Amino acid sequence: MHPVSTLGYQTPDAMGKLQRHMSAGAFLIDARFVPASRFRPAWAKKRLSERVGADNSCHAKGLGNAHYREATAEIKLHAPDDPQQGLSKVMKSLEERDVILLCACADSQQCHLAKVVELLRQQRPDLIAVPLYVASQAIEPASASAHEGH
């Protein structure tokens, strides 16, 4: 199984991190409830799809935080068990390639993707999850050959 990385587009150098992983063959799953950004249009669904390719990305609304507009509200994933837009979509993608889960957060400690990773680990305890939020993190994407036979 391939690793999953989590990335918030408000993280410093988020686009650079995304491009490095996409160049190495990763698949982007946009886990925002609403895949749009009024203030950072490069992160809108259409623009992302154009940048990384429609075959290399998808939107998984089921993994979005239904309370995303309420900073103090408890995280509530929209529909994590939905087979088309939930956890099973991530697990299926991880069988084939590295996955990047995208949201808007700048802080992995406050991000709903921590809950997504927790649920993924309930299904797959050996899952490798890499948060890409810290500006100084020097994490290189895994190469396809590193995952042969997994």
Image (cartoon, grey):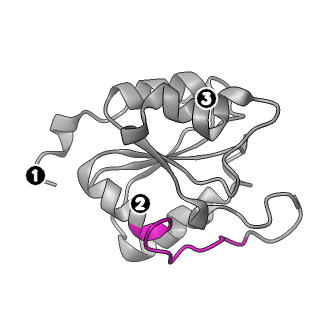
Instruction: Residue under label 1, please give it.
Output: 149
Q: Horizontal and vertical percent for residue 27?
A: 39, 43
Q: What amino acid type is highlighted by mark number 2? A: Val
On screen, residue 6 above or below 87 = above
Q: Which residue is drawn at 50% across and 68% down?
A: 86
Whether residue 140 is visible to the viewer of this picture, yes or no, is no
Find residue 96 and report its horizontal and vertical position in percent: 24, 51
First to last magenta residue range: 76-88
Secondary element at image label 1: loop
- 84 falls in the magenta region: yes
Residue labelled with disc 3: 14
Q: Which amino acid does label 3 sit on?
A: Ala
**Can residue 116 be seen in the rendering of this structure?**
yes
Which residue does the image show at 72% across and 45% down from the upper left?
A: 105
Task: Return the x and y of residue 61 as percentages of the image width and height.
Answer: 60, 61
Of labels 1 and 2, the one closer to you: 2
- The image's mark for residue 90 is 2
- Does the residue at mark 3 contact the one at mark 2 (Cβ under 8 Å)? no
Which element carries disc 3, helix, strand or loop?
A: helix
Mark 1 is surrounded, within 10 Å at the Cα level, by few (under 14), some (14 to 19) or many (20 or more) other residues, namely few
Image quadrant where one finds the N terminus: bottom left
How many C-alpha atoms fall within 10 Å of the one at disc 2: few (<14), some, or many (≥20)? many
**Picture quadrant of residue 114:** bottom right
Question: Sequence order check: which comes first, mark 3 or mark 2?
Answer: 3
Q: Give the dominant element type of the magenta stretch: helix, strand or loop.
A: loop
Q: In which quarter of the image is residue 131?
A: top right
Q: Is residue 127 left or right of residue 80?
A: left
Q: Please determine whether, in this image, residue 140 is positioned above or below residue 77.
A: above
Q: In which quarter of the image is the C terminus?
A: bottom left
Q: Between label 3 and label 2, give the one nearer the viewer.
A: 2
| Residue at (56% x, 33% y) in the render | 48
